[in-house]
Amino acid sequence: MEKILVTGGAGFIGYHTADYFLSRYPQLKAILVDNFMRAKLYGIPTNMQWENIKLLKERYGHRVEFIELDIRDHEKLCKVAKNVHVIAHIAAQVGVPTSIKNPRLDYEINTTGTFNVLEAARKADAIVIYCSTNKVYGENVNKIPIEEHETRYDYADPKYKGRGVPENFPIDLSAHTPYGVSKLAGDLYTQEYHYTYGLKTGVFRMSCIYGERQLGIEEQGWVAWFVKAAIEGKTITIYGTGKQVRDILYVKDLIKAWDLFINKKEVKHGVYNTGGGPENTISLVELIKLLEEKLGRKMEVKYADWRLHDQKVYYSDITKLQQKLNWKPEVDKLKGVEKLIEEKLCRREI
Ligand SMILES: NC(=O)c1ccc[n+]([C@@H]2O[C@H](COP(=O)([O-])OP(=O)(O)OC[C@H]3O[C@@H](n4cnc5c(N)ncnc54)[C@H](O)[C@@H]3O)[C@@H](O)[C@H]2O)c1
């Protein structure tokens, strides 16, 4: 691999992707594209996204090229993707509430944008990594019976309890939210570009990814948002009971899985549920308790109605990733959250 294109390169996972691959492969060049949509949509100062690019440039010099580009611009994207070997397609409209408010924008970025990336990859014969999501399973997940414990829900069905949701779980015949649908369309297209055009494509259905340099906001990036709120004394709103459960995955572990996929010659395609798995699950109220213990103070919490089509329990069955790519998360939830607290205490503006 000589050249990687990272879409969404000024974002959280995009930054870590470039950093990981550039540090691991000294000959590699990275082209990053982004249009700062996260800053524009969520009122985050654009310079916080620029800082990611600046840091990468300081660390890797001419091996990093940044191009301000919207993935909806197919022609420009194809020019930029010429001669790249891998495309890590990370750019997206990432918020569920924004997708409900503005489904066209969500559709155009996530579905058309992904289609453009795939077409560019087809022309360049590049390997594609696609950031999919647990939201592709939509409310089907809520059809699994659950049990209620003091601080969390869990699956009651032994098929899923302690194991998680596998890749062959039904994806249709349920609500998803527009975000879930636009990401699912991209997920299926990415699979199809392997089946029809023979591209090597990896679809990673990610649950909650967290880590340093995440600009967490209420709408997306809840672990980072809770840590930031806890440190800055901001009030957080819990939608529902707070007993909803997710498996959280430290960002560098995610990218290791991509690296294994790219380098495993005999693997030409795969769909992988990618999260911390059953050992790294946490509920919202459990994270609040953990933060209160670590910081030695109470958090301000408000409660509101459930969000539309929210999944009460989601955690990934990561057996396939373990078996096919010999991957497992290395940073557990406690260590990971501690890293985030340390970083946010040092850099309060993030
Ligand atoms: N963070 C998570 O927990 C999580 C979970 C599941 C899936 N995902 C997926 O992972 C990917 C990255 O998530 P993230 O947490 O790094 O979010 P992020 O918002 O930090 O990164 C996305 C980047 O894409 C850019 N972008 C948006 N629209 C664009 C466009 N039209 N053209 C060019 N760039 C554009 C944004 O400015 C941003 O920098 C997304 O595809 C998201 O759907 C994330």
Image (cartoon, rainbow, N blue to C red):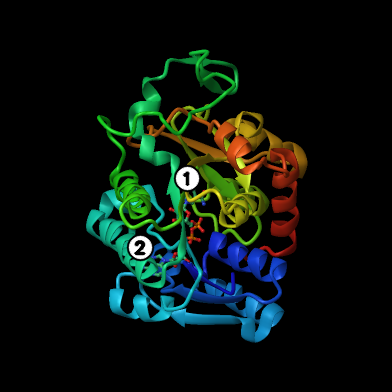
Q: State whether residue 177 is above or below residue 240.
A: below
> Mark 2 falls on what kind of element?
helix
Residue at the extreme bottom: 62
Q: Residue 347's spot in the image, x, y percent? A: 70, 65
Residue positioned 59% across, 63% down in the render = 17
Q: Which mark is residue 270?
A: 1
Asked whether the residues under the numbered discs 2 and 1 touch, taking CB atoms below 8 Å apart as contact, a structural biologist would say no
* Residue situated in front as seen by the camera: 131 or 179: 131
> Mark 1 falls on what kind of element?
strand
Between the residue at mark 2 and the residue at mark 1, the CA separation in whole angstroms equals 16 Å
Instruction: Name the amino acid, label 2.
Output: Leu
Q: Is residue 2 left or right of residue 35?
A: right
Q: Is residue 290 left or right of residue 263?
A: right
Residue 197 falls in image quadrant: bottom left
Label 2 Cα neighbours within 10 Å, binned few <14 / some 14-19 / many ≥20: many
Q: Which mark is residue 118?
A: 2
Residue 232 falls in image quadrant: bottom right
Instruction: Name the amino acid, label 1.
Output: Gly
